[in-house]
Image: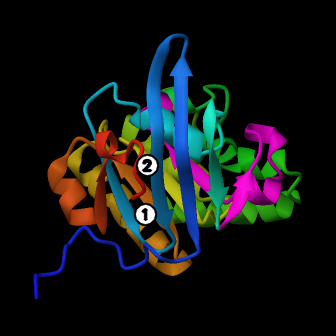
Amino acid sequence: MPPPDPHRSRHVTSPEHLLADEVTVGYGRQVVLDGVTVRVGRDETVGLRGPSGCGKSTLVRVLALLHRPDHGQVSIDGTPVHGVRYAVPVDLRTRVAVLFQSPRAAADPRLSLDDLIAEPLRAVRTPEATVRERVAELADLVGLTADLRGRRPHAVSDGQLQRACLARALVHRPDYLLCDEATAMLDASTQAHVAAVIRDYQRTQRAGVLVITHDQTLLDHWSDRIVDLAGAARART
């Protein structure tokens, strides 16, 4: 009997998954994704690799319901998603969250870190008492001290700001978390902390995680299985 494949997920046949099914995306005449199928199951970590410019970040935006594919379908636990952004019902779109590479590009410079974390809750009219409680809980989880929480992005480091962005990504308790080079701009200690928070969250919430990174060691260590984006075109994974 051959040895088990370390990149073969235990959950690949589960009906609980985030799925991009034969997704095609183009910008003008350039096709970035061509019939790509990628599946992320609950309670599994999928690593996504491929050369720069192959469409990894575009795929994340499609799975995060931020970009409509030209062809193909995104579904969550078997429910097809029609539309993107605020056209998607809140109880569906909040099941997927994304943590981007650059926290400064993802953060409104006018907001304090507390308000940055609270923004998604206030957008769905969450009672303010609940907002304050959840923000305090998440700030503690990601290691933001009280003296940092009132500061704006320009007054904190990249690592501190990425911790706030991670807290914001987890604020709705998403079932799927997409990490697009989320630790690339961080020092080693902050990388380790962010990764540990995500792993703990995954374990307690049975979340599915998609990790994009050029760090092969991180992919090998963290992933249940690894998808090569070039090989995902026109083939189910």
Q: Is mark 2 on a helix, strand or loop?
A: strand
Furthest residue to the left? 2
**Residue at position x 23%, y 41% from top?**
214
Q: Is residue 144 visible?
A: no
Up/down of 110 relative to 204, above or below: above
Residue beneath label 1, please? 198
Tell me where the magenta segment starts and ends, as one range. 78-104
Applied colour scheme: rainbow
Q: Could you tell me the amino acid type at mark 2?
A: Cys
Q: How far apart are marks 2 and 1 (CA)?
A: 10 Å
Mark drawn on residue 179: 2
Q: Report x, y in % for residue 51.
A: 25, 32
**Residue at position x 40%, y 37% from top?**
56
Q: Which of marks 2 and 1 is nearer the N terminus?
A: 2
**Residue at position x 57%, y 37% from top?**
151
Q: Do the residues labelled 2 and 1 touch (CB within 8 Å)?
A: yes
Q: In which quarter of the image is residue 159?
A: top left
Is 190 one of the magenta-colored residues?
no
Q: Report the number of numbered marks.
A: 2
**181, 139: nearer the viewer:** 181
Which mark's residue is nearer the viewer, 2 or 1?
Answer: 2
Q: Report x, y in % for residue 91.
A: 79, 60
Horizontal side of residue 214 vs 136, given as left or right: left
Quadrant of the drawing holding the C terminus: bottom left
Mark drawn on residue 183: none
Q: Is mark 1 on a helix, strand or loop?
A: helix
